[in-house]
Image: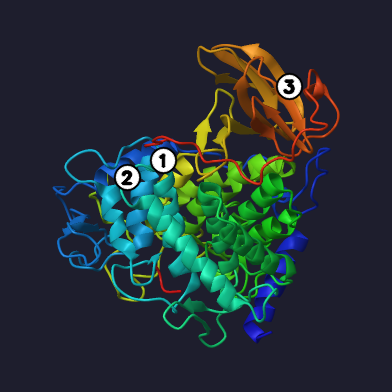
Amino acid sequence: MTRQRVAAFLITALALATLGAAQPCPAGQIAIEWVERMPAIPEPFDVRDWRTVARHYDRLVFDLHAEGPFLPLVWLDPDVPNLDGPGFGLPSYVGLARGGHRHEGINGIAAVLGASLIGIDKTAGPHNWVQMCRQYYQPDVGLVLNGVRGGTGRSFWYEIWPSILFYGLADRYPDENGLLPTCRRIADRWAEAVEALRPERGRAPDFDHAAFDFRTMQAVDHGRRREPEAAAGVAWMLLAAHQRWADPTHLEAAWACLAFLDGHEANPYYEVLLPWGALAAARANGQHGADHDVRKILTWCFDGRTTPRGSWGTVCGRWGEVDCHGLVGSLTDRGGYAFGMNTFAQPAALVPLVRYDDRFARAVGRYMLNAASAARLFYPDALPPDHQSSPDWKADPANCVAYEGLRKEWDGKCPYATGDVVRRNKGPTDLGLYGSSHVGLVAALVQRTDEDHILRLDCLATDFHHPPAYPTYLYYNPHDGPRQVSLDVGNAKRGLYDAAGNRWLIRGVRGKAAVTVPADAAVLVVVCPAGGKVIRDGPRLLVDGVVVDYRMEARGEALDSVTPTAGAPPRPMFHPAPSGPRRGSGGRDP
């Protein structure tokens, strides 16, 4: 290890040792040590209406006629090489030059996807922003990349994350011309890359490289930098593709990627992809009966003991007088440097994970309570002007554009909202659109309830290309006594099943239902048809043929009136994806 990595490891180890002892975990739940060291209720506690933030952001950044300093932000790109009509661009930071091809897929696609996730139809109106996102698909490579021109072989995450975002768009707009075929082509190309990365036939592929060049079909290295988390992002895309098209080539390649993560001993977290590997592992276990180590990958997403870049993970600490637990980034750069993009992106993978492995419901719920509160600190109105690097831009009265990052300390101010642009003399502000554009991922997940400190987390909102499912919500109660929250299930009669507790909460209810959440515990509420046919299939529980519990224990009320499956044919390896439209359902250098 280099001297810098040794120092980073020691700092992280010291943080672990000084944060206090973790509390016992309720039965049936698996503790993540780093999350256990986060407070049950962060102070000060302030969860924004993230949907309102996302709506304001969408309105500002897609306004071609906005007036004010550095406005409008968006522009039409009339001659993108990959479309018959115009594309569009957004600057990566407020104040950077507009026009031409100077725009990033991780920014533009994220902005369109985020708005779509909160119910805004981005195909409506004079411009079909969804179709315009196809500008980042490069047919000669067969991938969605970060620019409208350029190749591969520079950085894994820049060449995978735009495709994951595009997969989200295709899931929300399956009837839009070209989106799903593009996703299938991406899966085909990565399946080819997986084979090329195998040291020999039958062995796991080696992702311990910086990138992959699809022109030469060879791995690429840049000095000491490695991005082995690439296996996580590729595994998720391939599983999603298999869900859509049932191509065994995609499934086999996904297994190979997960085999790499299973055999990898060091934490591979580099930027933004690793949480999608945790989701892929949990989904592979739940859907396909695999046995991947979800706990290991999930722990990697938090504890910061990384090797690729040194202590990259989830903040667990109080910066000055503010709890910053749950933010994601470097844990050691001047004491800590978290980023908006990473903080908004990680929950999109981890919240749906609990559907497939409910043993982590409490850990994810506790983490999200902290992250949903601390994420406000990226925004200008959350800190005094002298605690931020660009307080003078006044063209955003709604304060919906976030800073690129938040440092634990800068010039004696703690915490300090900033970025990498101003201090490097690359632009006039550190307000980062590429991170802000991801806010819709969290906005789709998080909603306040009628009980203080208990959030409703929508487990389907970002579970792109998932198997058939009923509405599923995660609630975590941080209090030392039980609390009740209300859930409106609509006019049809429904049953409420708690997958985390393997029990029925309510057999039949209409309208608003009262859900009791035990102290320091989580419930995973699945809203099922009342009176549906309940079947036990191995470890899974199904209602009317749809899985409501992927890890059912053979006990409790859930087994009442269960139809046994003895003698039934083996369950299929996949479920066809739902058909029909699902519209609007709710960068820096590597």
- Position of residue 579 relative to residue 158, above or below, is above
Image position of 374 with respect to 433: above or below: above
Residue at 55% over, 58% down: 238
Q: Earlier in the sequence, mark 2 or mark 1?
A: 1
Q: Amino acid at mark 2?
A: Glu
Q: Identify residue for label 1.
A: 117
Which sits earlier in the primary sequence, circle 1 or circle 3?
Answer: 1
Q: Give how far across and how far down residue 438 sits, in percent.
A: 42, 51
Q: Secondary structure at mark 2?
A: loop
For the point 63% across and 62% down, the residue is 252
- Mark 1 belongs to which amino acid? Leu
98 and 557: which is toward the camera: 557
Q: Estimate the spatial distance between the alpha carbons at disc 3 and disc 2, rounded to whole Å.
A: 39 Å
Return the residue at label 2.
176
Q: Looking at the image, is 64 positioned above or below residue 306?
A: above
| Figure quadrant of residue 496 | top right
Q: Residue at x 51, y 47 (%)?
A: 244
Give the colour scheme of this rendering.
Answer: rainbow
> Height in image: 452 above or below 243?
above
> Neighbour class for label 1 at 10 Å: few (<14), some, many (≥20)?
many
Is 438 on the left or on the right of 425, as rendered?
Answer: right
Q: Nearer the viewer, residue 302 or 361?
A: 361
How far is mark 1 from mark 3, CA to CA?
29 Å
* Amino acid type, label 3: Trp
Is residue 38 at all visible to an observer of this figure? no
Q: CA distance from mark 2 to mark 1?
A: 16 Å
For residue 41, say whether it is visible.
Answer: yes
Q: Are marks 1 and 3 in contact (CB under 8 Å)?
A: no
Residue 303 coordinates in the image, percent (x, y) = 68, 61
- Comparing labels 3 and 2, the label whose residue is closer to the camera: 2
What residue does disc 3 label?
Answer: 504
